[in-house]
C-alpha cells in the first residue's frame, strides 16, 4: 500500500534490512580496464575521478565558430561527452549591439545547452568601470538568473572587482574564475583544483595557451589532474579541476576567411581529442556551480548512483524531511518571498492568509475568482467560480462533488474552506507538503483566449514546466479539465535541443473544442512556450534546485503568464521516454552519465 503508480512504473517506500552474508568465490580473467564513460553507465564511477570542466576563451566574434565547434563535437565524440558539458568565456564589447554575434552566443547557450560566461582578460577598454559594466550587461542579457562565470587575471585587485559583479547574481550563482599559470618547465603542474561543498566565491582555472600545431597532449593534461588532493572541503567531497584553453594569436582572434575559421576549428578539435580521454567526469563550469550550490534540503547526491531511476528519484524526494522546504510547498510564502525576490509574477490575489480561514468578505460581490487551500494537493477543495457558477466539480477527499455549472453557495464554500483547514495533503505526497501549515488564497480567475478561430471563448489553460538542473525538460499543457498535451526536450545528432510532442490525452471537449487548433498550436509554440520556459528556468535557478515543477496560468493571448504554484513531487503520467530523459539529466547533474 506504500507504492504510487506511474504508467508502467511505480514509486515505492524503501526500507533497509540486514541479511546474513554467504561466502562467494569469484573467478575472473584480467582484461583492460573499463573506460570512464562505460564505468559511469555501469554505476562504477567513483567520486575519486573528480569533476573536470573544459573551458575555451573566445573573442566576441567567434560565437558562430562555437556553434560550429559544438556540432562537430556532438557528431565526432558522440557518447563520450555531451554538448552541455562545454564552457565558453567571451570577451564582450563595452556596448553590446543586437546582431549576429549576440544571436550566436544565445544559440550556444539556449540551443546547445553549453555554458557561456565572460572573460575580463581581453575586454578592450581603458576605463575599468566601463569594462565591469560590459561584463554585467552581457551576463544579464544572456542569462540574468542563471550561473554567471567571470574569468579574470591572477591578480587580487581584478578578482575582487569581479566578485562585486558575481555577488549581484540574484540567484546566488555568481563565480569568479582566477586564471593561474600557464605551466612552465620550472613549475610543470599548476594548482587549479578545488573541492566542492565549500561555497567559494572564486575558483582557480589552469591557463593553457594553444596555437596552431601546438596544443596540450593528453599526457601533459593528465599531469594537471594527478595532483588533485587539495585540502578543505567535506569528507568525501568531489574535486573540481578547470582547464582553460586560450588562443590569443592574431590568427585566432581575427578570423577573416572560411579557410582561417577551419584552421581555428581544427585547432580546438585537436585539443578536444586530447582532453576528452582524461579520467574525470566532464561537466561545464555552470553545471558544477549548480551542483555546488544546490539547495541544501534538496541535495540527494549521497543517495543516488548511475542506475537510479525516475521512480527512485521521486521516492527520495517524497521522503525528504520538511525542514528547509517550506518556501516550495507554502503557496503564500512562495508568493511573498521567492517570487517577489526574483521579480516573477504570481496569480493576482484578493486575499492570502495562514491564520484566518474566513473568506466571505473577500468573495462578496465577486463573480469570477478561485478559492484555493494552500496546503492541499490533487485539486482538493479548490473552487473555480465563473459568472457566479462553479466552472468545475469540486474534489473533496478524493471524490468529486458534482457542482460544475451550479450557482455558488458562498456559505457552503466557506464551510469547505473550514473543513480543509484541519486536513493535510495525502500521506503519499512528499513530507514537505504533508507538513505544510494551513492557508487559503482567494485569487483572480485567469482565463486564456488562445483560439484564433474563436477569440471570445475563454478557457483555463495551465502550463506545468518540469525543470531539471536549470533546463526545461518537459511541459504539460492542460486545457481546463478536458485534456492535456505533453512536450518534451529532444536532442538531435549534432546536439541541438528543441521541444517536441511526447503525448496527449483528451476527453470529449464539447463546447471547449478549438475552432482553429492549428492557430492555437502556433500561438503556444511561438508566443507562449519561450516565455514560460524562460520564466520557469528563472524560478528554478533562483531556488537553486535539482528538479522542480513550475506551474503557470495563461491570460489572454499569452499576454501574461502567472506562476500559480511549485511542485516538488509531481505524480505525472509521462511516457517512458520522457521519464528516462528526466532521470538521465537528474543523475547527470549529480555526476553520473551523459545528458
Image: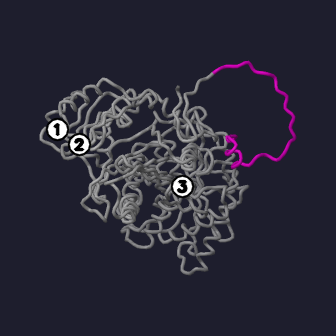
- Asked if the residue at tag 1 contacts the one at tag 2, i.e. Cβ–Cβ closer than 8 Å, the answer is yes
Q: Which mark is residue 179?
A: 3
Q: Secondary structure at mark 3?
A: strand
Q: Earlier in the sequence, mark 1 or mark 3?
A: 3
Residue 133 visible from this viewpoint:
no
377 vs 256: above or below: above
Residue linked to disc 1: 363
Q: Dot 2 corresponds to which residue?
A: 385
Q: Which residue is more in the foreground, 482 or 337?
A: 482
Mark nearer the N terminus (2 vs 1)? 1
**Residue in the image at 68% along x and 65% along y:** 270
Region in magenta: 17-45
Q: Position of residue 361 (x, y in %)?
A: 13, 34
Q: State the SS at label 1.
A: helix
Single out the mark in the foreground, 1 or 3. 1
Q: Residues within 10 Å of mark 1 (few under 14, many from 20)?
A: some
Amino acid at each position: 500500500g506504500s507504492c504510487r503508480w506511474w504508467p508502467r512504473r511505480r514509486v515505492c517506500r524503501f526500507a533497509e534490512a540486514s541479511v546474513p552474508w554467504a561466502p562467494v568465490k569469484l573467478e575472473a580473467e584480467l582484461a583492460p580496464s573499463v573506460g570512464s564513460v562505460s564505468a559511469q553507465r555501469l554505476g562504477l564511477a567513483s567520486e575519486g575521478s573528480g569533476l573536470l570542466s573544459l573551458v575555451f576563451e573566445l573573442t566576441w566574434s567567434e560565437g558562430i565558430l562555437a556553434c560550429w565547434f559544438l556540432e562537430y563535437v556532438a557528431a565526432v565524440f558522440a557518447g563520450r561527452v555531451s554538448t552541455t558539458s562545454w564552457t565558453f568565456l567571451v570577451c564582450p564589447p563595452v556596448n553590446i549591439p543586437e546582431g549576429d554575434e549576440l544571436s550566436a552566443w544565445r544559440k550556444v547557450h539556449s540551443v546547445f545547452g553549453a555554458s557561456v560566461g565572460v572573460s575580463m582578460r581581453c575586454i578592450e577598454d581603458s576605463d575599468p568601470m566601463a569594462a565591469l559594466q560590459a561584463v554585467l550587461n552581457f551576463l544579464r542579457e544572456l542569462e540574468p538568473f542563471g550561473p554567471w562565470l567571470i574569468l579574470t587575471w591572477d591578480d587580487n585587485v581584478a578578482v575582487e572587482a569581479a566578485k562585486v559583479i558575481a555577488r549581484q547574481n540574484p540567484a546566488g550563482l555568481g563565480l569568479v574564475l582566477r586564471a593561474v599559470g600557464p605551466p612552465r618547465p620550472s613549475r610543470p603542474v599548476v594548482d587549479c583544483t578545488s573541492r566542492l561543498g565549500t561555497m567559494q566565491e572564486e575558483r582557480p582555472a589552469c591557463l593553457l595557451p594553444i596555437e596552431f600545431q601546438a596544443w596540450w597532449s593528453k599526457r601533459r593534461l593528465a599531469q594537471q589532474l594527478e595532483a588533485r588532493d587539495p585540502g578543505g572541503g567535506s569528507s568525501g567531497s568531489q574535486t573540481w579541476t578547470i582547464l582553460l584553453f586560450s588562443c590569443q594569436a592574431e590568427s585566432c582572434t581575427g578570423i577573416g576567411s572560411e579557410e582561417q575559421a577551419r584552421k581555428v576549428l581544427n585547432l580546438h578539435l585537436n585539443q578536444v581529442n586530447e582532453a576528452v580521454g582524461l579520467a574525470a567526469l566532464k561537466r561545464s563550469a555552470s553545471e558544477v556551480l549548480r551542483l555546488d550550490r544546490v539547495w541544501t534540503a534538496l541535495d540527494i547526491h549521497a543517495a543516488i548512483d548511475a542506475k537510479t531511476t525516475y521512480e527512485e528519484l521521486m521516492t527520495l524526494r517524497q521522503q525528504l524531511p520538511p525542514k528547509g522546504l517550506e518556501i516550495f510547498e507554502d503557496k503564500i510564502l512562495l508568493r511573498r518571498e521567492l517570487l517577489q525576490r526574483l521579480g516573477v509574477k504570481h496569480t493576482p490575489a484578493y486575499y492570502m492568509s495562514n491564520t484566518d480561514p474566513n473568506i466571505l468578505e473577500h468573495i462578496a460581490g465577486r463573480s469570477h475568482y478561485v478559492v484555493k487551500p494552500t496546503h492541499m494537493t490533487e485539486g482538493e477543495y479548490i473552487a473555480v467560480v465563473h459568472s457566479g457558477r462553479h466552472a468545475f466539480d469540486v474534489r473533496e477527499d478524493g471524490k468529486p462533488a458534482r457542482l460544475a455549472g451550479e450557482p455558488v453557495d458562498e456559505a457552503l464554500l466557506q464551510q469547505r474552506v473550514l473543513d480543509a483547514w484541519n486536513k493535510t495533503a495525502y500521506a503519499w505526497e512528499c513530507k514537505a507538503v504533508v507538513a505544510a501549515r494551513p492557508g487559503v488564497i482567494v485569487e483572480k480567475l485567469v482565463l486564456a483566449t488562445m483560439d484564433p478561430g474563436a477569440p471570445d471563448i475563454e478557457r483555463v489553460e495551465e502550463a506545468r514546466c518540469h525543470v531539471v538542473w536549470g533546463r526545461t525538460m518537459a511541459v504539460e499543457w492542460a486545457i481546463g479539465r478536458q485534456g492535456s498535451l505533453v512536450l518534451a526536450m529532444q536532442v538531435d545528432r549534432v546536439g541541438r535541443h528543441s521541444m517536441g510532442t511526447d503525448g496527449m490525452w483528451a476527453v470529449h471537449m464539447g463546447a471547449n473544442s478549438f475552432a482553429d487548433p492549428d492557430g492555437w498550436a502556433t500561438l503556444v509554440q511561438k508566443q507562449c512556450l519561450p516565455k514560460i520556459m524562460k520564466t520557469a528556468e528563472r524560478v528554478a535557478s533562483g531556488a537553486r534546485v535539482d528538479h522542480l515543477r513550475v506551474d503557470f496560468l495563461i491570460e489572454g493571448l499569452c499576454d501574461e503568464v502567472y506562476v500559480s504554484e511549485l511542485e516538488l513531487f509531481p505524480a505525472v503520467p509521462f511516457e517512458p521516454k520522457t521519464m528516462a530523459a528526466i532521470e538521465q539529466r537528474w543523475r547527470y547533474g549529480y555526476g553520473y552519465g551523459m545528458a
